[in-house]
Image (cartoon, rainbow, N blue to C red):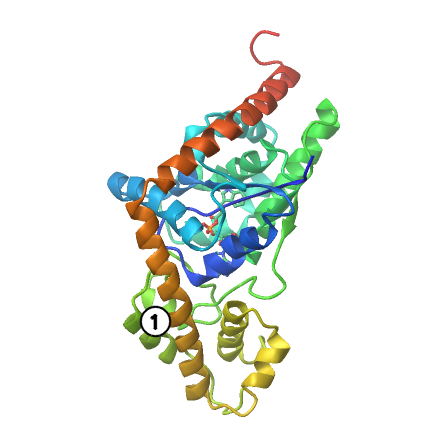
Amino acid sequence: MNKRLLTGLQPSGELTIGNYIGGIRQVVNYEKDYETFLFVPDMHSITVPQDPETLHRRVREIVGMYLACGVSPTENHIYVQSEIPQHANLSWILECSAYIGELSRMTQFKAKAEGKKEIGCGLFTYPVLMAADILLYNAQYVPTGADQKQHVELARNLAQRFNAKYGDTFVVPEPLIPKVGAKIRDLLSPDKKMSKSAANPRGSIFLNDPEKAIRKKIMGAVTDSDTFVKFDEENKPGVSNLLTIYACFSDTSIEETEKHFADARYGDLKKEVAELLVEKLTVLQDKFAEIMKSGLVDETLDRGRDAVRPIAEETYDKVRRLVGLGRL
Ligand code: TYM
Protein backbone atom coordinates (compact mmCIF):
# COMPACT_ATOMS: atom_id res chain seq x y z
CA MET A 1 0.00 0.00 0.00
CA ASN A 2 1.07 3.55 -0.66
CA LYS A 3 2.44 5.43 2.31
CA ARG A 4 0.01 7.92 3.74
CA LEU A 5 0.37 11.66 3.89
CA LEU A 6 -1.99 13.87 5.89
CA THR A 7 -2.48 17.55 6.52
CA GLY A 8 -5.17 20.12 7.27
CA LEU A 9 -5.74 23.88 7.25
CA GLN A 10 -8.02 25.53 9.76
CA PRO A 11 -11.10 27.33 8.44
CA SER A 12 -10.57 30.06 11.03
CA GLY A 13 -9.87 32.88 8.56
CA GLU A 14 -9.09 33.56 4.93
CA LEU A 15 -6.11 31.53 3.69
CA THR A 16 -2.84 33.38 3.17
CA ILE A 17 -0.04 32.73 0.70
CA GLY A 18 1.82 31.27 3.72
CA ASN A 19 -0.89 28.60 4.10
CA TYR A 20 -0.64 27.90 0.39
CA ILE A 21 3.14 27.50 0.46
CA GLY A 22 3.45 25.59 3.76
CA GLY A 23 0.34 23.43 3.34
CA ILE A 24 -1.58 23.21 0.07
CA ARG A 25 1.31 23.42 -2.38
CA GLN A 26 3.00 20.48 -0.72
CA VAL A 27 -0.14 18.37 -1.15
CA VAL A 28 -0.24 19.27 -4.84
CA ASN A 29 3.41 18.23 -5.14
CA TYR A 30 3.08 14.96 -3.26
CA GLU A 31 -0.44 13.70 -4.02
CA LYS A 32 0.68 11.37 -6.78
CA ASP A 33 3.25 9.59 -4.63
CA TYR A 34 1.16 8.97 -1.51
CA GLU A 35 -2.33 8.15 -0.35
CA THR A 36 -3.23 11.68 0.71
CA PHE A 37 -5.59 12.83 3.43
CA LEU A 38 -6.44 16.54 3.33
CA PHE A 39 -9.03 17.56 5.85
CA VAL A 40 -10.76 20.63 7.29
CA PRO A 41 -9.92 20.83 11.01
CA ASP A 42 -13.05 22.73 12.02
CA MET A 43 -12.91 21.36 15.57
CA HIS A 44 -9.57 23.08 15.99
CA SER A 45 -11.10 26.39 14.96
CA ILE A 46 -13.52 26.52 17.89
CA THR A 47 -10.61 26.65 20.34
CA VAL A 48 -11.01 30.41 19.81
CA PRO A 49 -14.38 32.17 19.45
CA GLN A 50 -16.06 31.73 16.04
CA ASP A 51 -19.25 33.00 14.47
CA PRO A 52 -21.17 29.78 13.61
CA GLU A 53 -22.48 30.96 10.25
CA THR A 54 -19.09 32.19 9.14
CA LEU A 55 -17.47 28.94 10.23
CA HIS A 56 -19.99 26.86 8.25
CA ARG A 57 -19.32 29.00 5.18
CA ARG A 58 -15.56 28.75 5.55
CA VAL A 59 -15.64 24.95 5.80
CA ARG A 60 -16.91 24.82 2.22
CA GLU A 61 -14.83 27.74 0.99
CA ILE A 62 -11.57 26.30 2.23
CA VAL A 63 -12.24 23.13 0.25
CA GLY A 64 -13.04 25.33 -2.77
CA MET A 65 -9.60 26.88 -2.26
CA TYR A 66 -7.87 23.50 -1.95
CA LEU A 67 -9.36 22.54 -5.30
CA ALA A 68 -8.69 25.92 -6.94
CA CYS A 69 -5.03 25.59 -5.88
CA GLY A 70 -4.79 22.40 -7.90
CA VAL A 71 -5.46 19.69 -5.32
CA SER A 72 -7.16 16.81 -7.12
CA PRO A 73 -10.69 16.06 -5.94
CA THR A 74 -10.26 12.38 -6.79
CA GLU A 75 -6.60 11.59 -5.93
CA ASN A 76 -7.09 12.64 -2.28
CA HIS A 77 -9.39 12.00 0.61
CA ILE A 78 -10.84 15.44 1.36
CA TYR A 79 -13.14 15.53 4.39
CA VAL A 80 -14.33 17.52 7.39
CA GLN A 81 -12.89 16.59 10.79
CA SER A 82 -16.14 17.01 12.74
CA GLU A 83 -17.94 14.57 10.42
CA ILE A 84 -15.72 11.73 11.70
CA PRO A 85 -16.37 11.43 15.46
CA GLN A 86 -13.35 9.16 16.03
CA HIS A 87 -11.04 12.22 15.93
CA ALA A 88 -12.49 13.43 19.24
CA ASN A 89 -12.74 9.92 20.67
CA LEU A 90 -9.10 9.13 19.99
CA SER A 91 -8.07 12.56 21.20
CA TRP A 92 -9.58 11.78 24.61
CA ILE A 93 -7.63 8.53 24.92
CA LEU A 94 -4.39 10.27 23.92
CA GLU A 95 -5.10 13.13 26.33
CA CYS A 96 -5.05 10.64 29.15
CA SER A 97 -1.42 9.85 28.39
CA ALA A 98 -0.26 13.39 27.50
CA TYR A 99 1.49 15.40 30.20
CA ILE A 100 0.50 18.87 31.34
CA GLY A 101 4.21 19.73 31.24
CA GLU A 102 4.69 18.87 27.57
CA LEU A 103 1.51 20.69 26.51
CA SER A 104 2.58 23.76 28.51
CA ARG A 105 5.74 23.93 26.43
CA MET A 106 3.91 24.32 23.10
CA THR A 107 4.98 27.68 21.73
CA GLN A 108 1.72 28.22 19.84
CA PHE A 109 -0.27 27.71 23.04
CA LYS A 110 1.96 30.15 24.91
CA ALA A 111 1.57 32.74 22.14
CA LYS A 112 -2.22 32.38 21.93
CA ALA A 113 -2.70 32.35 25.70
CA GLU A 114 -0.44 35.33 26.34
CA GLY A 115 -2.21 38.20 28.04
CA LYS A 116 -5.54 36.33 28.23
CA LYS A 117 -7.30 36.06 31.58
CA GLU A 118 -9.46 33.11 30.65
CA ILE A 119 -7.81 30.45 28.56
CA GLY A 120 -10.02 27.74 27.11
CA CYS A 121 -9.01 24.14 27.85
CA GLY A 122 -9.38 23.38 24.13
CA LEU A 123 -6.57 25.77 23.35
CA PHE A 124 -4.38 23.80 25.75
CA THR A 125 -5.28 20.31 24.52
CA TYR A 126 -5.42 21.30 20.83
CA PRO A 127 -2.08 19.61 19.96
CA VAL A 128 -3.46 16.29 21.25
CA LEU A 129 -6.44 16.57 18.91
CA MET A 130 -3.94 17.24 16.13
CA ALA A 131 -2.04 14.09 17.13
CA ALA A 132 -5.32 12.15 16.95
CA ASP A 133 -5.98 13.57 13.44
CA ILE A 134 -2.68 12.12 12.28
CA LEU A 135 -2.56 8.83 14.21
CA LEU A 136 -6.14 7.87 13.40
CA TYR A 137 -5.11 7.28 9.78
CA ASN A 138 -1.59 6.04 10.51
CA ALA A 139 -0.14 8.77 8.33
CA GLN A 140 3.59 8.53 7.78
CA TYR A 141 4.16 12.07 6.56
CA VAL A 142 2.69 15.39 7.66
CA PRO A 143 3.48 18.32 5.35
CA THR A 144 3.28 21.64 7.21
CA GLY A 145 5.03 24.94 7.70
CA ALA A 146 7.68 25.30 10.41
CA ASP A 147 5.10 26.54 12.96
CA GLN A 148 3.47 23.08 13.23
CA LYS A 149 6.71 21.09 13.67
CA GLN A 150 6.47 21.05 17.45
CA HIS A 151 2.91 19.71 17.25
CA VAL A 152 3.98 16.89 14.93
CA GLU A 153 6.78 16.08 17.38
CA LEU A 154 4.18 15.75 20.12
CA ALA A 155 2.21 13.36 17.88
CA ARG A 156 5.39 11.31 17.49
CA ASN A 157 5.92 11.20 21.26
CA LEU A 158 2.32 10.20 21.95
CA ALA A 159 2.49 7.46 19.29
CA GLN A 160 5.73 6.10 20.73
CA ARG A 161 4.37 6.22 24.29
CA PHE A 162 1.24 4.34 23.26
CA ASN A 163 3.20 1.77 21.25
CA ALA A 164 5.56 1.16 24.18
CA LYS A 165 2.67 0.45 26.52
CA TYR A 166 0.23 -1.45 24.30
CA GLY A 167 2.40 -2.84 21.50
CA ASP A 168 2.92 -1.59 17.95
CA THR A 169 -0.26 0.26 17.09
CA PHE A 170 0.47 3.63 15.52
CA VAL A 171 2.77 4.64 12.69
CA VAL A 172 5.16 7.27 14.08
CA PRO A 173 4.66 10.29 11.78
CA GLU A 174 7.31 12.59 10.35
CA PRO A 175 6.88 16.28 9.52
CA LEU A 176 7.58 17.39 5.94
CA ILE A 177 8.71 21.00 6.13
CA PRO A 178 9.45 22.72 2.79
CA LYS A 179 13.09 23.78 2.33
CA VAL A 180 11.95 27.11 0.91
CA GLY A 181 8.92 28.88 2.38
CA ALA A 182 8.62 27.06 5.73
CA LYS A 183 7.87 30.40 7.34
CA ILE A 184 6.48 33.15 5.15
CA ARG A 185 6.78 36.34 7.17
CA ASP A 186 4.34 39.13 7.91
CA LEU A 187 4.97 41.93 5.39
CA LEU A 188 4.89 44.64 8.05
CA SER A 189 6.57 42.73 10.90
CA PRO A 190 9.03 40.34 9.24
CA ASP A 191 9.99 38.98 12.66
CA LYS A 192 6.56 37.30 12.79
CA LYS A 193 4.97 34.64 10.56
CA MET A 194 2.28 35.70 8.12
CA SER A 195 -1.02 34.62 9.65
CA LYS A 196 -4.73 34.36 8.77
CA SER A 197 -5.58 35.94 12.07
CA ALA A 198 -2.96 38.71 12.27
CA ALA A 199 -4.18 41.86 13.97
CA ASN A 200 -3.23 43.93 10.91
CA PRO A 201 -4.41 42.33 7.63
CA ARG A 202 -2.07 44.59 5.62
CA GLY A 203 0.81 42.32 6.64
CA SER A 204 -0.80 39.27 5.00
CA ILE A 205 -1.64 38.47 1.38
CA PHE A 206 -4.85 36.46 1.29
CA LEU A 207 -5.50 34.09 -1.57
CA ASN A 208 -8.69 35.99 -2.35
CA ASP A 209 -7.21 39.50 -2.13
CA PRO A 210 -8.18 41.76 -5.04
CA GLU A 211 -5.44 42.97 -7.39
CA LYS A 212 -5.28 46.44 -5.87
CA ALA A 213 -4.83 45.12 -2.34
CA ILE A 214 -2.06 42.74 -3.44
CA ARG A 215 -0.11 45.55 -5.08
CA LYS A 216 -0.62 47.91 -2.16
CA LYS A 217 0.43 45.37 0.45
CA ILE A 218 3.57 44.26 -1.41
CA MET A 219 4.61 47.85 -2.19
CA GLY A 220 4.17 48.65 1.52
CA ALA A 221 6.23 45.67 2.70
CA VAL A 222 8.90 46.52 5.25
CA THR A 223 12.45 46.03 3.91
CA ASP A 224 15.58 47.59 5.45
CA SER A 225 17.81 50.62 5.10
CA ASP A 226 20.29 48.96 2.70
CA THR A 227 19.82 49.32 -1.02
CA PHE A 228 20.92 45.92 -2.34
CA VAL A 229 18.88 42.75 -2.83
CA LYS A 230 20.34 39.72 -1.06
CA PHE A 231 18.92 36.62 0.56
CA ASP A 232 19.90 36.88 4.21
CA GLU A 233 17.09 35.86 6.52
CA GLU A 234 18.81 37.01 9.67
CA ASN A 235 19.88 40.49 8.63
CA LYS A 236 17.42 41.16 5.79
CA PRO A 237 14.23 39.29 6.75
CA GLY A 238 11.86 41.55 4.78
CA VAL A 239 13.81 41.34 1.50
CA SER A 240 14.44 37.61 1.99
CA ASN A 241 10.71 37.11 2.49
CA LEU A 242 9.92 38.81 -0.83
CA LEU A 243 12.55 36.67 -2.57
CA THR A 244 11.05 33.55 -1.00
CA ILE A 245 7.54 34.46 -2.13
CA TYR A 246 8.82 35.09 -5.65
CA ALA A 247 10.76 31.79 -5.71
CA CYS A 248 7.74 29.80 -4.50
CA PHE A 249 5.27 31.33 -6.93
CA SER A 250 7.62 31.15 -9.91
CA ASP A 251 8.83 27.63 -9.07
CA THR A 252 12.46 28.67 -9.10
CA SER A 253 15.21 28.33 -6.50
CA ILE A 254 16.30 31.05 -4.11
CA GLU A 255 19.68 31.20 -5.88
CA GLU A 256 18.07 31.79 -9.28
CA THR A 257 15.71 34.36 -7.79
CA GLU A 258 18.57 36.18 -6.10
CA LYS A 259 20.44 36.26 -9.43
CA HIS A 260 17.35 37.50 -11.25
CA PHE A 261 17.13 40.47 -8.87
CA ALA A 262 20.88 41.04 -8.48
CA ASP A 263 20.81 44.57 -9.89
CA ALA A 264 17.28 45.46 -8.88
CA ARG A 265 16.27 48.15 -6.43
CA TYR A 266 13.74 47.39 -3.70
CA GLY A 267 11.01 49.14 -5.69
CA ASP A 268 11.66 46.93 -8.73
CA LEU A 269 11.71 43.80 -6.61
CA LYS A 270 8.37 44.69 -5.05
CA LYS A 271 6.79 45.52 -8.41
CA GLU A 272 7.78 42.17 -9.87
CA VAL A 273 6.66 40.20 -6.82
CA ALA A 274 3.30 42.02 -6.91
CA GLU A 275 2.94 41.35 -10.63
CA LEU A 276 3.61 37.65 -10.21
CA LEU A 277 1.15 37.34 -7.33
CA VAL A 278 -1.57 39.20 -9.21
CA GLU A 279 -1.09 36.90 -12.19
CA LYS A 280 -1.17 33.68 -10.14
CA LEU A 281 -3.88 34.66 -7.66
CA THR A 282 -6.24 36.00 -10.32
CA VAL A 283 -6.24 32.61 -12.06
CA LEU A 284 -6.82 30.90 -8.73
CA GLN A 285 -9.68 33.23 -7.80
CA ASP A 286 -11.42 32.64 -11.12
CA LYS A 287 -11.19 28.89 -10.58
CA PHE A 288 -12.44 29.28 -7.02
CA ALA A 289 -15.50 31.23 -8.17
CA GLU A 290 -16.30 28.53 -10.72
CA ILE A 291 -15.89 25.72 -8.20
CA MET A 292 -18.13 27.43 -5.65
CA LYS A 293 -20.89 27.70 -8.24
CA SER A 294 -20.66 23.97 -9.01
CA GLY A 295 -21.56 21.12 -6.68
CA LEU A 296 -17.95 19.90 -6.59
CA VAL A 297 -17.21 20.82 -2.97
CA ASP A 298 -20.05 18.82 -1.46
CA GLU A 299 -19.50 15.92 -3.82
CA THR A 300 -15.83 15.81 -2.86
CA LEU A 301 -16.56 16.04 0.87
CA ASP A 302 -19.20 13.30 0.77
CA ARG A 303 -16.86 10.98 -1.08
CA GLY A 304 -13.97 11.81 1.26
CA ARG A 305 -16.07 11.21 4.38
CA ASP A 306 -17.24 7.84 3.10
CA ALA A 307 -13.72 6.77 2.16
CA VAL A 308 -12.04 7.65 5.47
CA ARG A 309 -14.80 6.61 7.86
CA PRO A 310 -13.98 2.86 7.82
CA ILE A 311 -10.27 3.62 8.38
CA ALA A 312 -11.08 5.82 11.38
CA GLU A 313 -13.50 3.26 12.79
CA GLU A 314 -11.00 0.45 12.49
CA THR A 315 -8.17 2.34 14.22
CA TYR A 316 -10.36 3.64 16.98
CA ASP A 317 -11.91 0.26 17.65
CA LYS A 318 -8.48 -1.33 17.93
CA VAL A 319 -7.29 1.40 20.29
CA ARG A 320 -10.30 1.38 22.59
CA ARG A 321 -9.99 -2.41 22.97
CA LEU A 322 -6.29 -2.12 23.75
CA VAL A 323 -6.91 0.37 26.55
CA GLY A 324 -9.86 -1.62 27.90
CA LEU A 325 -12.82 0.57 26.96
CA GLY A 326 -16.29 -0.89 26.42
CA ARG A 327 -16.95 -4.56 25.79
CA LEU A 328 -14.53 -6.82 23.98
P1 TYM B 1 -3.03 26.42 10.11
O1 TYM B 1 -4.45 26.40 9.68
O2 TYM B 1 -2.59 27.48 11.06
O3 TYM B 1 -2.09 26.49 8.85
C1 TYM B 1 -2.27 25.65 7.73
C2 TYM B 1 -0.93 25.28 7.13
O4 TYM B 1 -0.25 26.45 6.70
C3 TYM B 1 1.06 26.48 7.28
N1 TYM B 1 1.42 27.88 7.52
C4 TYM B 1 2.49 28.48 7.02
N2 TYM B 1 3.48 28.02 6.23
C5 TYM B 1 4.44 28.90 5.87
N3 TYM B 1 4.44 30.20 6.27
C6 TYM B 1 3.47 30.70 7.05
N4 TYM B 1 3.46 31.97 7.42
C7 TYM B 1 2.42 29.81 7.46
N5 TYM B 1 1.31 29.98 8.23
C8 TYM B 1 0.71 28.77 8.25
C9 TYM B 1 0.93 25.68 8.56
O5 TYM B 1 2.17 25.22 9.03
C10 TYM B 1 0.00 24.58 8.13
O6 TYM B 1 0.72 23.58 7.46
N6 TYM B 1 -2.88 22.87 13.62
C11 TYM B 1 -2.88 23.10 12.18
C12 TYM B 1 -4.04 22.40 11.49
C13 TYM B 1 -4.08 20.94 11.77
C14 TYM B 1 -3.22 19.95 11.20
C15 TYM B 1 -3.65 18.71 11.77
C16 TYM B 1 -2.14 20.01 10.31
C17 TYM B 1 -4.96 20.32 12.58
N7 TYM B 1 -4.71 18.98 12.61
C18 TYM B 1 -3.00 17.52 11.45
C19 TYM B 1 -1.50 18.80 10.00
C20 TYM B 1 -1.93 17.58 10.57
C21 TYM B 1 -3.03 24.59 11.93
O7 TYM B 1 -3.53 25.31 12.76
O8 TYM B 1 -2.64 25.00 10.69
Q: Can you say whether 158 is above or below 92 in the image?
A: below
Please state the horizontal and vertical placement of residue 62, each as a whole percent of the image.
38, 48
Residue annotated with mark 1: 214
Please state the horizontal and vertical placement of residue 301, each as a whole percent of the image.
42, 36
Query: Does the rendering let one see residue 58?
Result: yes
Please tell me in which quadrant of the rendered image residue 51 appears. top left
Seen at 54% across and 53% down, the residue is 28
Dot 1: within a 10 Å radius of its alpha carbon, few (fewer than 14), some, or many (20 or more) residues?
many
Secondary element under disc 1, as helix, strand or loop, is helix
Please tell me in which quadrant of the rendered image residue 233 appears. bottom right
Q: Can you say whether 275 is above or below 229 in the image?
A: above
Q: Amino acid at mark 1?
A: Ile
Please state the horizontal and vertical placement of residue 190, each as a whole percent of the image.
47, 72
Q: Nearer the viewer, residue 220 or 269?
A: 269
**The N terminus, quarter of image:** top right
Query: Does the rendering let one see residue 230?
Result: no
Residue 245 vs residue 318: left or right? left
Q: Can you say whether 91 is above or below 141 in the image?
A: above
Please tell me in which quadrant of the rendered image residue 75 appears. top right
Seen at 46% across and 25% down, the residue is 85
Q: Furthest residue to the top?
A: 327
Please state the horizontal and vertical placement of residue 56, each as a whole percent of the image.
30, 39
The mark total stands at: 1
**The C terminus, quarter of image:** top right
Q: Is mark 1 within 8 Å of ligand 1?
A: no
Seen at 60% across and 24% down, the residue is 315
Q: Nearer the viewer, residue 287 or 311?
A: 287
